Amino acid sequence: MEINYIGHSCFFFRSESGTSLLTDPYGDIGFSFPRLKADIVTVSHGHYDHCNVEAVDGAFSLLRKAGKFNVRGIEVCASDSFHDDAHGSKRGKNLIFSFEMDGIRICHLGDLGQKLESSVLKAIGKPDVLLIPVGGHYTIDGIAAAEYVRAVSPAIAIPMHYYVEDLTVDIANESSFLKAVGDKYSVRKELVISKNTLPSETQIIVMERI
């Protein structure tokens, strides 16, 4: 399976058979969204920096509500959570998406705003790869994100939704998260993984935007 980071909370996955899945395509956030074609598109919530589905090419299947789905042989589960720490009263609901591709379990937390709670841990399950927001303000911050990583113990944890150059969304950068997890991480432009190559202990990977 190939993983590419498109930026913000958007990732592009391609299975060995060629099926592709795209998460949270963004609108105008200071840099433009590239032209991409996907088979499956997931949207965690309706804010402009996560739901620009009109920018995606192809006759894709759009998943943006809670439930269990089977699309082109990919099992996807979307679970309700909250975009804030006040049971959604500030920013509403958020979907946590979990799916399996090439035998690898992926969990994308969207704009999760809840601190460590048993209900969220149940929705996350036991993923091999955890995609987690770390920028704070609208989501959990770096310290809370590190607590989730320690509780879930994925093989790979990839931070997302943090400040980078030119971003116009008011969030912090990834430094507090990296410090909280011990400053042990690698930086990758592209990630190609298989079930047999997953690390036995959690690795933090910071991905560069393509």
Image (cartoon, grey):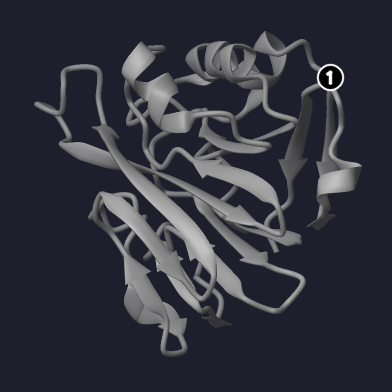
Q: Quadrant of residue 3?
A: bottom right
Find residue 105 and report its horizontal and vertical position in percent.
62, 44
Q: Nearer the viewer, residue 210 or 75?
A: 75
Find residue 27 and report its horizontal and vertical position in percent.
37, 65
Find residue 209 and report its horizontal and vertical position in percent.
68, 56
Q: Quadrant of residue 129?
A: top right
Q: Which residue is situated farthest in the right direction here?
A: 197
On-image quarter of the C terminus: bottom right
Q: Is residue 186 left or right of residue 100?
A: right
Q: Is residue 16 left or right of residue 128?
A: right
> SS class of the residue under badge 1?
loop
According to the image, label 1 marks what residue? 184
Q: Amino acid at mark 1?
A: Lys
Looking at the image, residue 41 lies above or below residue 169 = below
On-image quarter of the N terminus: bottom right
Crowdedness near tag 1: few (<14), some (14–19) or many (≥20) residues, C-alpha within 10 Å = few
Looking at the image, residue 104 lies above or below residue 10 = above
Q: Nearer the viewer, residue 175 or 19?
A: 19
For image coordinates 44% across by 21% down, the residue present is 121
Looking at the image, residue 59 lies above or below residue 3 = below
Counting labels gives: 1
Q: Is residue 12 left or right of residue 82?
A: right
Residue 19 appears anywhere in the view = yes
For image coordinates 42% across by 81% down, the residue present is 60
Looking at the image, residue 96 lies above or below residue 84 = below
Find residue 136 and report its horizontal and vertical position in percent.
42, 25
Q: Quadrant of residue 197?
A: top right
